[in-house]
Amino acid sequence: MVTAGDPAWHDYDLHVRATKKSGKEGFLVAFGVKDTGTYYWWNLGGWNNTRSAVEQSADGGKSTLLSKAGSIETGRAYDIDVKVRGRQVTLSLDGERWGSFTDDKPAEPFRQTVTRDERTGELIVKVVNAQDAAARTAVDLGGAKVAPRARVTTLAADQDAVNTETDAPVTPVASTFSGAASRFTYSFPANSVTFLRIRQR
């Protein structure tokens, strides 16, 4: 996939002049590309040149946001414009507005689960915050009576950080948290995986 610009951009205009030379399909124009599994593309003349659609890929799973019937002519030059303003995207084809959408889902996934360690009896709160900002979040243990002091293990690093033989930017950090209760709030760092081990009373 050919990309241009910076993945951090959030307000920009992308203009492409494209011509289909041959084949059964039209062409794809990618935008909002984070990595090989996270992007949007405008599929013009897809499905054997019968439809055009905007598709979103998130963590490798694809969904369709907009779809219209239509084909792309061979040998004709098309002016394609994608206007991105924050989470709002407007698409134009040959100067005519084709469609728009607002992606109001969280920019990045936030996942959590609570399990019980049968051996120790501790509750283990596991949280993934793959957003670029810390997330202060309510944790509800469903009425369980717990000790206020919890053991915490946190792995936090830049999204592109990779451990090597000589460098380990992704390293677990141990700490304690004294505000555990049946229901409490905790600030989970950006781009992190956090484990809280909480002893039940």
Image (tube, rainbow, N blue to C red):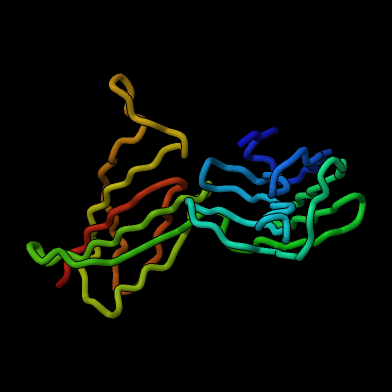
Q: Residue furthest left?
A: 119
Horizontal relation, residue 5 to residue 181: left or right? right
Q: Residue furthest right?
A: 95
Horizontal relation, residue 5 to residue 183: left or right? right
Residue at (73% x, 53% y) in the render = 45
Residue at (65% x, 58% y) in the render = 47
Can you say whether 151 is above or below 99 in the image? Answer: above
Q: Position of residue 74 (x, y in %)?
A: 81, 44
Q: Quadrant of the C terminus?
A: bottom left
Horizontal relation, residue 145 to residue 142: left or right? left
Q: Quadrant of residue 137?
A: bottom left
Can you say whether 128 is above or below 7 in the image? Answer: below
Q: Residue furthest top?
A: 166
Q: Position of residue 162 (x, y in %)?
A: 38, 31
Q: Quadrant of residue 126?
A: bottom left
Residue at (51% x, 50% y) in the render = 131
Residue at (40% x, 47% y) in the render = 192
Q: Residue furthest bottom?
A: 143
Q: Position of residue 130 (x, y in %)?
A: 46, 50
Q: Quadrant of the N terminus?
A: top right
Q: Which is nearer the eye, 39 or 139?
A: 39
Counting the numbered discs, the total is 0
